[in-house]
Image: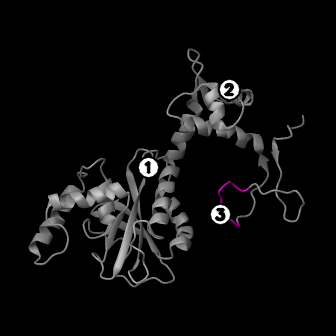
């Protein structure tokens, strides 16, 4: 039996007239073409992606439109997806939704996610965009902890090491975790006592910089939440600026912070500058890939 004409995706061979690359749309330039595949599988996946992105079940015409195909073609794919339990149809409303097999696949994928591994794999490309030292931090037993460095060729000398716990009020990493560990404008139960300890130490130090009371902390964390990004300028290390962007999992929990830091002589601390924007975009994309759908 011969496969339909649109079913086989030819391998793009350099120098072959008419060959076309089947690299993923939006992939970085210069990547080698992927191997030949079944194009109809990729076409049909658009229906599953449309259902995943929809707020609820969809009528056939709406689902087809969202997937960019006509209703007759969409229906043929949906029949197969229903046989595989990837899609289900409510017989009372005729609306389609993801089926139990899709749920099993999703749960299996989530159980195998390694957010730090995924983040580490993306840092070299982000380094090329930003040109400054990058780091990853997770919440440890004593607070936000550095677990990975990616040093820039023009790296500055800093007295920080893997495993160091970052302060909540004077580091971008700490501010990010303090702001996003709990939803809304609340403090996470694990953040609050550490924050109070830092405030108490600051009150004991004459001329200490930074907030000295909870009411002074509130607007700092509100700005971090509003911007979706934390920033410090010389407060942790003199002459050093830093940003930290939050990464969330499918349940909306903060799983890690992506950090950029550098000398203020070359590190752009503007909220809409060439460091902040790519860092925030990379964190949003990783959150999305981990299943996060919130704002």
CA neighbours of label 3 inside 10 A, class few (<14), some (14 to 19), many (20+)? few
Label 2 residue SS: helix
Q: Residue at x 37, y 61 (%)?
A: 229
Q: Which mark is residue 249?
A: 1
- Residue corresponding to mark 2: 83
Residue drawn 58% across and 34% down? 51
Boundaries of the magenta span: 23-30
Query: In front: 47, or 138?
Result: 47
Tell which circle, 2 or 1, labels the residue nearer the N-terminal end.
2
Image quarter of residue 212:
bottom left
Q: Secondary structure at mark 1?
A: loop
Q: Position of residue 268 (x, y in %)?
A: 42, 75
User: Where is residue 283 shown, x and y percent of the image?
Assistant: 46, 59
Tell me the distance, in whole angstroms, between the alpha carbons under discs 1 and 3: 25 Å
Q: Nearer the viewer, residue 75 or 115?
A: 75
Badge 1, how many Cα within 10 Å: few under 14, some, many 20+? many
Q: Main secondary structure of the magenta part?
A: loop
Marks 3/2 in contact by CB < 8 Å: the verdict is no
In this orientation, does residue 160 appear? no
Q: Are marks 1 and 3 in contact (CB under 8 Å)?
A: no
In this rendering, the answer to whether 37 lies above or below 100 is below
Q: Nearer the viewer, mark 2 or mark 1?
A: 1
- Left or right: 229 in relation to 92: left
Horizontal and vertical percent position of residue 191: 24, 57
The Cα atoms of the two marked residues, 3 and 2, are separated by: 36 Å
Q: Nearer the viewer, mark 1 or mark 3?
A: 3
Give how far apart the Cα atoms at labels 2 and 1 are. 31 Å
* Residue position for label 3: 28
Task: Single out the mark in the foreground, 3 or 2.
Answer: 3
Q: Tell me the element at label 3.
A: loop
- Sooner in the amino-acid sequence: mark 3 or mark 2: 3
Which residue lies at the image location 53% right of the left edge and 42% below the top edge? Answer: 108
């Amino acid at each position: 039996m011969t496969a339909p004409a649109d079913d086989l995706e030819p391998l793009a061979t350099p120098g072959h007239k008419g060959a076309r690359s089947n690299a993923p749309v939006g992939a970085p330039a210069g990547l080698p073409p992927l191997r030949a595949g079944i194009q109809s599988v990729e076409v049909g996946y658009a229906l599953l992606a449309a259902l995943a992105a929809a707020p609820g079940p969809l009528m056939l015409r709406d689902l087809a439109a969202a997937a960019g195909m006509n209703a007759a073609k969409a229906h043929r794919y949906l029949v197969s997806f229903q046989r595989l339990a990837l899609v289900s149809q409510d017989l009372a409303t005729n609306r389609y939704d993801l089926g139990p097999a899709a749920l099993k696949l999703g749960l299996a994928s989530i159980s195998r996610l390694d957010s730090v591994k995924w983040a580490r794999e993306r840092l070299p490309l982000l380094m090329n965009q930003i040109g400054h030292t990058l780091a990853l931090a997770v919440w440890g037993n004593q607070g936000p902890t550095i677990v990975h460095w990616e040093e820039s060729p023009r790296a500055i000398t800093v007295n920080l090491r893997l495993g160091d716990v970052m302060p909540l009020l004077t580091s971008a990493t700490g501010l990010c975790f303090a702001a996003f560990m709990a939803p809304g404008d609340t403090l996470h139960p694990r953040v609050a006592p550490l924050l109070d300890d830092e405030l108490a130490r600051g009150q004991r130090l004459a001329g200490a910089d930074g907030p000295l009371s909870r009411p002074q902390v509130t607007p700092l964390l509100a700005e971090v939440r509003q911007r979706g990004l934390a920033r410090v300028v010389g407060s942790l290390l003199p002459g050093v600026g830093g940003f930290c962007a939050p990464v969330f999992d499918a349940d909306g929990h903060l799983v890690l912070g992506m950090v950029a830091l550098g000398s203020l002589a070359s590190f752009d601390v503007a909220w809409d500058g060439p460091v902040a924007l790519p860092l925030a975009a990379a964190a949003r994309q990783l959150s999305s890939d981990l299943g996060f759908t919130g704002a």
